[in-house]
Image: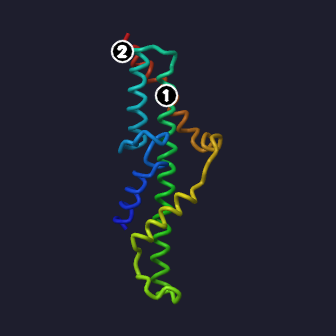
């Protein structure tokens, strides 16, 4: 099972929808909270040093929100892949060899994993912006509060 999870995580890291923010910024390997705090701290320092009417804070919050959405999508796709592979293994155990495919091996092959990954990516739920906000409003509130607090602290230190 560990081998399959590593395979799917590697595929997710290299896929355009799940491995990049805004489809061109490579996602760093860190937890969502660490990414949020480091991004907000960096952009708060930039805002305190180069005042720009909260433009830097808005960009930092936007990056945090995109990271949250991509990581949520990655978690859903990984869960679907692992579930489908487990169901395939269970069907091998319960049903045995399919008479239509007598040469099919009784284990999950790399081509099976590639198909499972493609079907999970293609079958993912595509949420509209307002649905994303409704589902992740707590994270938005945390981003806003931490942005204001960290900006306040960094502006006091820098000034």
Q: Residue at x 44, y 83 (%)?
A: 104
Q: Residue at x 40, y 13 (%)?
A: 156
Callout 2: SS: helix
Is the residue 155 above or below the residue 127 in the image? above
* Residue ID for mark 1: 59
Choose between 93 and 27: the one closer to the eye.
Answer: 27
Is the residue 5 above or below the residue 18 in the image? below
How many C-alpha atoms fall within 10 Å of the one at disc 1: few (<14), some, or many (≥20)? some
Earlier residue among tags 2 and 1? 1
Callout 1: SS: helix
Which dot, 2 or 1, sits closer to the camera?
1
Choose between 140 and 13: the one closer to the eye.
Answer: 13
Q: Which mark is residue 157?
A: 2
Choose between 48 and 112: the one closer to the eye.
Answer: 112
- Quote the CA–CA distance across marks 2 and 1: 22 Å
How many C-alpha atoms fall within 10 Å of the one at disc 2: few (<14), some, or many (≥20)? few
Looking at the picture, how far across and down is residue 116, in whole percent? 49, 66
Contact between marks 2 and 1 (CB within 8 A): the answer is no
Residue lying at the far top of the rendered structure: 159
Question: Looking at the rendering, in which quadrant would you find the C terminus?
Answer: top left
Looking at the picture, how far across and down is residue 91, in whole percent? 50, 80
Q: Residue at x 39, y 15 (%)?
A: 49
Colour style of the rendered protein structure:
rainbow
Looking at the picture, how far across and down is residue 135, in whole percent? 60, 44
Looking at the picture, how far across and down is residue 77, in whole percent? 50, 57
Q: Which mark is residue 33?
A: none
Question: Looking at the rendering, in which quadrant would you find the N terminus?
Answer: bottom left
Choose between 137 and 112: the one closer to the eye.
Answer: 112
Is the residue 141 above or below the residue 30 in the image? above
Horizontal side of 21 relative to 157 (left or right) equals right
Q: Residue at x 37, y 42 (%)?
A: 28
């Amino acid at each position: 099972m560990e081998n399959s999870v590593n395979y799917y995580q590697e595929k997710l890291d290299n896929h355009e929808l799940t491995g990049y923010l805004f489809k061109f910024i490579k996602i760093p390997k860190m937890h969502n909270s660490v990414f949020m705090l480091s991004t907000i701290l960096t952009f708060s320092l930039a805002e305190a040093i180069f005042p720009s009417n909260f433009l830097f804070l808005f960009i930092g919050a936007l990056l945090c929100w995109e990271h949250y959405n991509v990581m949520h999508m990655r978690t859903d796709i990984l869960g679907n892949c692992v579930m489908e592979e487990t169901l395939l293994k269970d069907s091998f155990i319960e049903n045995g060899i399919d008479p239509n495919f007598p040469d099919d091996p009784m284990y999950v092959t790399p081509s099976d994993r590639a198909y499972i990954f493609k079907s999970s990516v293609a079958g993912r739920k595509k949420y509209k912006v307002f649905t994303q906000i409704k589902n992740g409003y707590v994270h938005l509130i945390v981003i806003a509060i931490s942005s204001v607090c960290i900006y306040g602290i960094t502006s006091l230190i820098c000034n």
